[in-house]
Amino acid sequence: MIAAMSLLHTTVGTIGVASAGWDHAATPILFLHGVGSTKEVWRPQLAHFGAHRPAYAIDYPGYGESEFRAAATLDDFADAALAALDALGIEQAHICGLSLGGVVAIALHHRAAARCASLILADTFAAHPDGPGIFQRSIDASRTMTMADLAAARAPLLLGSAATDGMRAVVIQTMASINPDAFRLGAAAVWLADQRGRAAAINVPTLVLVGEEDRITPPALSAELAAMIVGAQLETIAKAGHLINLEKPDEYNRLVDRFLSEMPATIEG
């Protein structure tokens, strides 16, 4: 299934969205990207999940096709996701975020728990022990390098041992396209976040996924996050780095499918 691209006109500005499977009746799924990505990285998931349910991926403010919002914060990113759900007429969805997307998903649940049928949190955390340091290095690099050069330097850290040259090219091309000002806002949103209290308050079914070889958010951080959330499931994907949805799409999709198949009938309708 080929994803359709469109613009949503919302209460917080224009938001770029990719969608598939809009004619299905199952609970929708919303994908939230990382700090160095856009909605484009979710194409393998839109094609897979769109075969059975409405599937959407959005750009954060200033990313991809979304309208830039000066000084946008983590909670502003969460509000943008909620505004996109409103514009799409979706009352409740499975919220699936990777890295920054997982951080945004936790913030979204904090702001509107009833909108979350479940959370799927990949390669992410509640608080990163080296967050301020990574933030400062990211800001410095974004001011002294082009986004293309930054992407080329960062790609080896993002990907695991099974990544192909084609995957590296996609990662570099996507990151190179990001507005540096938006990237800096995204870096603050993810690396300076401390949501341990918010994570402990999560009260919906939650799946935590992590790549075995993730060097950006190591598996120990995912284990720590899962331990904070009552009833959370934790799964590790072998030979994968930080971008598990791209590196191991079949395994990633299978684990998410299994998790969604366990949802109560009241959620899936």
Image: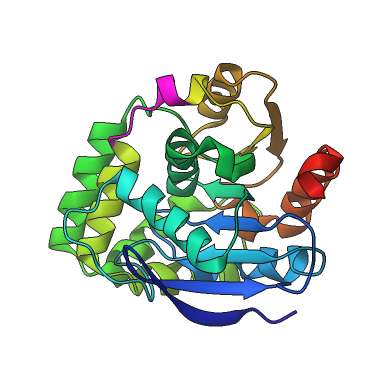
Seen from the viewer's position, the closer of residues 116 and 155 is: 116
Seen from the viewer's position, the closer of residues 220 and 118 is: 118
Q: Is residue 77 above or below residue 232?
A: below
Position of residue 116 in the picture relative to residue 231 (left or right)? left
Confirm whether residue 264 shows in the render: yes
Place of residue 249 in the rendered image (x, y in percent of width and height, measured from the top left): 71, 58
Position of residue 63 in the picture relative to residue 169 (left or right)? left
Colouring scheme applied when the structure was drawn: rainbow
Q: Residue at x 54, y 40 (%)?
A: 123
Place of residue 44 in the rendered image (x, y in percent of width and height, measured from the top left): 68, 67
As for residue 193 lying within the magenta part, the answer is: yes
Q: Is residue 253 above or below residue 224?
A: below
Place of residue 47 in the rendered image (x, y in percent of width and height, measured from the top left): 72, 71
Q: Residue at x 43, y 44 (%)?
A: 104
Position of residue 156 in the picture relative to residue 239 (left or right)? left
Q: Which quarter of the picture shows residue 247?
A: bottom right
As for residue 163 lying within the magenta part, the answer is: no
Seen from the viewer's position, the closer of residues 92 and 251 is: 92
Position of residue 232 in the picture relative to residue 111 (left or right)? right
Place of residue 165 in the rendered image (x, y in percent of width and height, measured from the top left): 57, 70
Seen from the viewer's position, the closer of residues 112 and 166 is: 112
Q: Residue at x 64, y 18 (%)?
A: 230
Q: How many marks?
A: 0
Q: Which quarter of the picture shows residue 183?
A: bottom left
Q: Residue at x 85, y 44 (%)?
A: 261
Q: Is residue 265 above or below residue 169?
A: above
Confirm whether residue 211 shows in the render: no
What segment is highlighted magenta in the picture? Answer: 192-198
- Quarter placement of the N terminus: bottom right
